[in-house]
Structures are given as structure tokens and as C-alpha cells.
Image: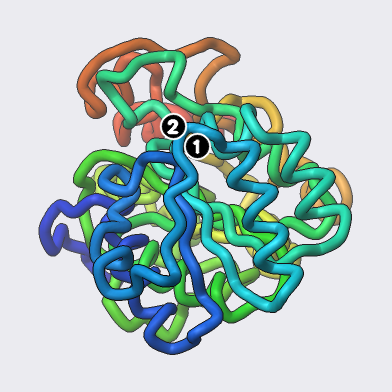
Amino acid sequence: MRPRYVNLGAKETRAGFGVGLVEAAERDTRVVALSADLMGSLKMETFAKRFPERFFQCGVAEANMIGVAAGLATVGFIPFVGTFANFATGRVYDQIRQSVCYSGKNVKIAASHAGLTLGEDGATHQMLEDIGLMRGLPGMVVLSPCDYNQTRLATLAAAQIEGPVYLRFGRPAVPNFTPPEDPTFQIGKAQVLLEGTDGVIFATGHIVWEALQASYALEERGLQIAVVNIHTLKPIDVEGVVKWLERTPVVVTAEEHQIHNGLGDIISHIATQYYPRFVERVAVADTFGESGKPQELLEKYGLSAAFIVKAVERALRRV
């Protein structure tokens, strides 16, 4: 009998970061936080009130914020910098590359408002290229948790590992369905949410919930489609991915990211190296987004559960 994941209540993944950040600071006095004039959006208010001497408001000066964080890491602190994903990557890529990754600084980049589900702010703020940008940096760990509870756990885990971490999460309230204390969550390990013998869906971030709904819809047709949560995009769990490539020729990826340089490319690369499989991809088709309600955008750009079902159907026809 496969588990039935239920929505425990829609919650913002960015709020999971805010709670996790406070807990990390309670556990380790070296944890500090920096904001680029987005304390409210990144849910850092509680941290700033609890630890005012460990909170630094850098203003709308993201490049400077990365430099300050690198300096703090140099003298032994564990800085978390918080801003929108488009500012946290594209605007400060040079600073991250040179001041953080090149010297392996222990800086954690907390990037909120990623993907299409940012919604009404539109294309300029809907960062859909960040996974590719951050994966390309030597030494950078890339995390994309699926809900509020997992974002909290990812924040705690990021504070405990040495070196640069990119933590990607979103703006809207989305289904919260994983346990608050989940022993199966581990950086660098793929998380099997549903077993299946007829195919596998590798998903990441907010789209994991959509993948679960797609699998349940296909179950009503007599198909058992596994769902694997790739919350860690780097380092990727090669062994865990190959296990599923060996089990089934039906492979689908689903992500709230451009079709290029994201999860689909990661799984395809592993398949090419270890166990050749055709990979059917669900992702943004090399285009910018637009303003709209989050769920409406998932539908328009082909990322919802219904489109994942169609992707599985296409993959099945290839077998």
C-alpha cells in the first residue's frame, strides 16, 4: 500500500526558512543573518528581534552584502544572506564566484521568490535560471526543498555543513506535506516518496506536490509511478538516480525552472553516463514568465499535475 500524502495546511516555504534560521542561531552562536532590505519578505523579523547584534541590514546593495558575508565567514561566522532569487544569483554572480566559491567561504545564500510561483511580480522577478547558475560554481551545494517543513530542515542542515550553500525556496503558500522531523531528509540523498514499478518522476521544489498528484491520478488507471524528491541538486545522488534508471525505462523530470541547465539536464547527464534512458522533461520551455496567479501560471506554462500526467503518457508510448 503506497502512502497517501495529504496537505497539512498551505504554508510559505520562505516561512520555513525564517523558522529554521532562528533555530540554527539558537544552536550555534556563529550563525548571523544579512538582508538586502527584504527582512519581511525573507521572514527574518524574528531573527532580527531575537539576535539584533547578529543581524545586518545591508540595504539594496546585494553585491556589497555578499562581500560582507564573505568577510564574516573569514573570521569564523556562518552568514546567511537573504534576498530574492533573481538578486541572489544573477545580480551578484561575480561576487559569489570570486568572494565566496573561489575561496570556499562558509556562506549560505537564502534565495526566496524563485520560479514561476512568485506570481504577480512577473517575469523580471521570476528567476528560472538559478539552478544552472549555482550548479556551475565549484564547491556550491544547491538545495531546493519541497515544502515548509523541508525548507526548515534544509536551513538547519545548511548551517551544519562547511562551505557555500544555495538554498532555493518560494513566495506563495503551498501544500505542506512532509513530516516536521523527517529522518529521511539528508543533503545529497534523493528521497523516495512513492514507490512504483511502471515509471518514475524525479521532481524538485514546489513541483514535488504536483508530481505526487500526477502519480495518484495515474494510479487510478492502474499505473504505479514512483515519485523521487530531488531536494539536493548538487551534490546529486547519482547512485539513487541510477537505481531508478535501472528499474524502469519510463523517466520523467518536473521542475519550476528553465528546461535548460536544471533537473532535466542533471538526470539526462546521469542517464548518458551510467544507464541510457530517454528522459521526458516538464519545465519552462525556454521562455520568460509573466504576471499571474501561481497556479494559473503552472497551468499556462505546463508545470501542473495534469501536464506531468501527459509527460508520463508520452514516455509510456516510447516503451
Categorize mark 1 by other alpha carbons within 10 Å: few (<14), some (14-19), many (20+): many
**Secondary structure type for disc 1:** helix
| Residue visible at 31% across and 36% down in the picture | 305
Q: Position of residue 208 (x, y in %)?
A: 39, 50
Q: Residue 85: which numbered mark, if any?
A: 1
Q: Is residue 170 left or right of residue 158?
A: left
Q: Nearer the viewer, residue 248 or 3?
A: 3
User: Which of the two marks, 1 or 2, is nearer to us in this view?
Assistant: 1
Q: Amino acid at mark 2?
A: Gly
Q: Quadrant of the N terminus?
A: bottom left
Structural distance between the alpha carbons of marks 1 and 2: 8 Å
Judged from this view, the residue extending furthest toward the left is 9
| Residue visible at 39% across and 17% down in the picture | 301
Tell me which numbered mark, 1 or 2, is placed earlier along the sequence.
1
Q: Nearer the viewer, residue 22 or 237?
A: 22
Q: Position of residue 54 (x, y in %)?
A: 44, 70
Say if residue 266 shows up in the picture.
yes
Q: Position of residue 64 (x, y in %)?
A: 63, 41
| Residue visible at 51% across and 21% down in the picture | 284
Q: Is residue 168 above or below residue 51?
A: above
Q: Nearer the viewer, residue 253 or 96?
A: 96
Are the residues flagged by discs 1 and 2 in contact, CB closer than 8 Å? yes
Residue receiving disc 2: 115
Q: Position of residue 214 (x, y in %)?
A: 32, 42
Q: For residue 152, which quarter of the picture?
A: bottom left
Q: Is residue 313 above or below residue 173?
A: above
